[in-house]
Image (spheres, rainbow, N blue to C red):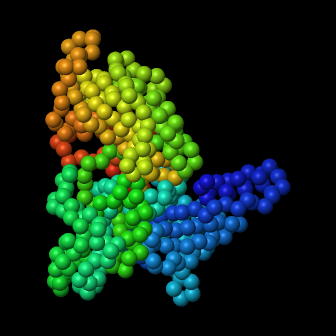
């Protein structure tokens, strides 16, 4: 529940002349902060704020796993204004903040921002941050990168200069090599450690950052573990772009509590996929008018224990990828995963398309199986991924993310996917 709701409830009770019972204890709320330079090189810190009887208390901390001690927070809140004090004694800093909203976020921003200084803001999605969202952010102001499967690790210059071999916790990490391309080669960090040490010998050397692979679903856990190492300055989301498609859906659609329900996941796919493949509009309650086939739908667990639902789909290319004059046939898996793009109320689905085959549409009858030919163009696969993610997002009223290195170009009437991660707010002039 957002902070402002507490004061609305109090005002209503006073107007009605009701006797006010003691307010029940409420859990502290987590905010991200911008413009507070206490935990560099991170641009975001985590504020945990509790409000009781107009008094504010809490802490300001670096992202999870960083060993630096949190700072105390204190202050007052009334009528949409918060006086927030960071630290104590001679190391205390006071801020005057006002409440507002941007998109799905609750925002507290400075009442009197000073020109040429980075504005201070506290913000959180209405549904709160997911665990992954609180652990995974990007470092640079301009960012286009992965939300899944990788991390950017900034190594401490002094550690590279003084340590001939990396510690065991770093040695076996898979470092991404070469330019930003799909299916990039990797090498163990221990094998490139000598080259990284050379890179910091120059007098004007900048900190060395390497992109590493992370197990799907284990990105936040790995980030927390790496941040605790003395050889690591920071861990963030990688700034390199690769192949990625995901869409957020409400957690109750496919989860029971904190766990994915295989029964709910299967039921969700049985409801959504026929509507998608038959050309129905996003959010429609029934299937569209186009003929389709859906077979072999089942749920399972992959080698890492992640739940997934898979099926074979066949339908008009106009429904599957906004194509023309063709019928598509492909295998689809949807893997649920909590990512940095999710709020506390959502979970992402990762579509993966394989064995894409197509045949010319020649009449009302479906083509014979022999008429389908394998599609070699990776842009066609990317188009199906994009259509699935954007169509589900439009129907659910949620967000989707899509990145590709292929030559795929979104059709003019395509639904839109952004690559926004929930670790920032827009500038005031952009929000108006």
How many marks the image carries: the answer is: 0
Which residue is more in the foreground, 51 or 241?
A: 241
**Image quarter of residue 41:** bottom left
Q: Taking 185 as reference, is 63 above or below it?
A: below
Q: Is residue 103 visible?
A: no
Q: Is residue 75 above or below residue 90?
A: above
- The x, y position of residue 203, in whole percent, is 18, 85
Judge by depth and name the residue closer to the eye, 301 or 321.
301
| Residue 104 located left or right of residue 181 | right
Residue 95 drawn at (x, y percent): 52, 73
In percent of width and height, residue 3 lies at: 61, 58
Outermost front residue: 303
**Which residue corresponds to the image point at 65% horizontal and 66% vertical from the top-left?**
51
Which image quadrant: the N terminus? bottom right
Point 20% across, 13% down: residue:
362
Decide which of 280, 84 is in the foreground and name it. 280
């Amino acid at each position: 529940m957002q902070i402002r709701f507490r004061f609305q409830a109090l005002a209503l009770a006073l107007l009605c002349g009701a006797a006010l019972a003691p307010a029940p204890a409420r859990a502290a709320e987590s905010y991200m902060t911008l413009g507070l330079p206490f935990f560099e090189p991170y641009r975001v810190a985590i504020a945990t704020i509790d409000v009781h009887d107009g008094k504010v208390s809490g802490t300001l901390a670096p992202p999870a796993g960083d060993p630096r001690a949190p700072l105390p927070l204190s202050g007052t809140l009334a009528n949409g204004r918060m006086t927030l004090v960071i630290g104590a004694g001679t190391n205390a800093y006071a801020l005057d903040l006002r409440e507002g909203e941007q998109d799905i976020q609750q925002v507290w921003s400075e009442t009197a921002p000073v020109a040429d200084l980075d504005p201070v803001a506290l913000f959180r999605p209405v549904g709160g941050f997911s665990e992954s969202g609180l652990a995974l952010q990007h470092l640079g102001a301009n960012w286009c990168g992965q939300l899944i499967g990788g991390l950017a690790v900034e190594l401490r210059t002094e550690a590279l200069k003084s340590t001939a071999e990396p510690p065991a916790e770093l040695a076996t990490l898979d470092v991404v090599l070469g330019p930003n391309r799909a299916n990039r080669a990797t090498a163990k960090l221990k094998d490139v450690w000598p080259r990284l040490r050379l890179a910091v010998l120059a007098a004007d050397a900048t900190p060395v950052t390497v992109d590493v692979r992370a197990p799907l679903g284990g990105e936040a856990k790995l980030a927390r573990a790496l941040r605790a190492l003395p050889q690591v300055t920071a861990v963030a989301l990688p700034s390199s772009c690769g192949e990625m498609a995901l869409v957020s859906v409400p957690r109750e659609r496919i989860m029971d509590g904190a766990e994915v329900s295989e029964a709910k996941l299967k039921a969700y796919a049985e409801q959504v996929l026929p509507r998608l493949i038959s050309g129905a509009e996003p959010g429609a309650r029934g299937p569209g008018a186009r003929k389709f086939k859906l077979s072999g739908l089942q749920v399972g667990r992959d080698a890492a224990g992640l739940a997934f639902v898979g099926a074979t789909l066949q339908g008009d290319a106009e429904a599957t990828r906004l194509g023309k004059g063709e019928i598509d046939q492909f295998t689809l898996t949807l893997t649920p995963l909590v990512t940095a793009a999710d709020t506390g109320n959502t979970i992402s689905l990762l579509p993966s398309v394989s064995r894409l085959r197509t045949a010319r549409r020649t009449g009302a009858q479906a083509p014979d199986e022999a008429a389908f030919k394998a599609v070699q163009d990776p842009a066609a696969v990317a188009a199906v991924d994009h259509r699935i993610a954007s169509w589900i997002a439009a129907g659910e009223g949620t967000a989707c993310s899509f990145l590709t290195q292929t030559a795929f170009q979104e059709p003019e009437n395509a639904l839109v996917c952004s690559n926004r991660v929930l670790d920032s707010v827009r500038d005031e002039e952009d929000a108006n």
